[in-house]
Amino acid sequence: CSKWERCQTHSKGVPSSVAFNELLHACGDWLTKEKGLLEIPSVFFHVKSGDGKLEAFELTAWALVTEMRMREWDNSVKKVCKSSIGKMEYITQKNGPVWIFGHPLFYEYNVGYDMSTKQVSLKKEECQPCSAEGGVSLSDDGRRRWPRAAQGEPRITHYNLNLPL
C-alpha cells in the first residue's frame, strides 16, 4: 500500500492490508482505460536458489488481481476485484511459515519442478502454444492492464494444516 498512491490516500488510520482490499473491492469505481491495473505496483518475493543466492521474482497486479461480479447487500450486482494472495496461518516445524502462491505464479512464469533435486524453476518467458492454432501471448499489448474475469464465487482451498510440509 505504501508504494501505491491511491492506497496511501485511502489508508488514513486503517491498516494498509485493509485499505488495499477495500480499494480492490471498489475497482469498478477507479479502473480507467488509461491506467487500469498498471497503477498498482508489483509485489516482489525472494527465493534462495540451489546455490544459496537470493533471487527476486515479480508478481504484477495483472497476475494478482481477479475481477468478478458480486451481489451486494441491497441485491444489486457490482464489479469488484479480489487479490489472489492473502495470509494463511500455516507454520511448519521444518520450514516455518508457508506461502502458497497458486495461480498468480503460473500467470507470470513458466513454472517447473525437478523431482531429482526437489528444486522449483521460474522462467519469465512467453507461453508456448498448446496446438498449431496458436496460444496465449503474455506480451503487454494492453491486455495486462485489465484483470482477468472470474465467473461465480471464488473457490476457497482448504489445507490440512496438521500434515507435515
Image (spheres, helix red, strand yellow):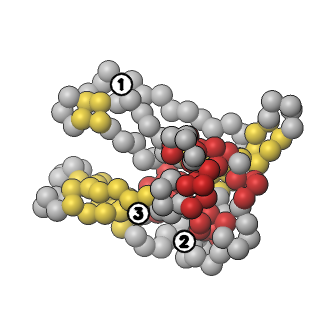
Q: CA distance from mark 1 to mark 3?
A: 27 Å
Foreground residue among 52 and 160: 52
Query: Which numbered marker is on residue 58?
Result: 3
Residue 92, horizontal then vertical, whole percent: 25, 30
Name the quadrant containing residue 46.
bottom left
- How dense is the environment of label 2, judged by Cα within 10 Å: few (below 14), some, or many (20 and up)? some
> Please, what secondary structure does the residue beneath circle 1 have?
loop
Label 2: which secondary element: loop
The percent position of residue 131, horizontal first and vertical second, equals 56, 69
Q: Which residue, given by chain and number where applicable, does mark 1 sit on?
A: 161
| Tag 2–tag 3 contact (CB < 8 Å) | no
In three-dimensional space, the C-alpha distance between marks 1 and 2, rounded to whole angstroms, equals 35 Å
Q: Nearer the viewer, residue 115 or 133?
A: 115
Residue 22: x and y in percent read 63, 43
Does residue 46 lie above or below 164 as drawn? below
Point 51% across, 45% down: residue: 16
Amino acid type for the residue under numbered disc 2: Leu
- The amino acid at mark 1 is Leu
Residue for badge 2: 138
Label 3's element?
A: strand
Amino acid on which the number 3 mark rests in the picture: Glu
In the rendered image, the residue lying farthest to the top is 162
Q: As displayed, is residue 48 above or below residue 141?
A: above
- Position of 80 compared to 160: left or right? right
Query: Which comes sooner in the sequence, label 2 or label 3?
Result: 3
Residue lying at 47% horizontally and 73% vertically, measured from the top left: 126
Is residue 3 positioned above or below 34 on the image?
Answer: above
Classed neighbour count for the residue bearing mark 1: other residues with Cα under 10 Å, few (<14), some (14–19), many (≥20): few
Sequence-first tag of 1 and 3: 3
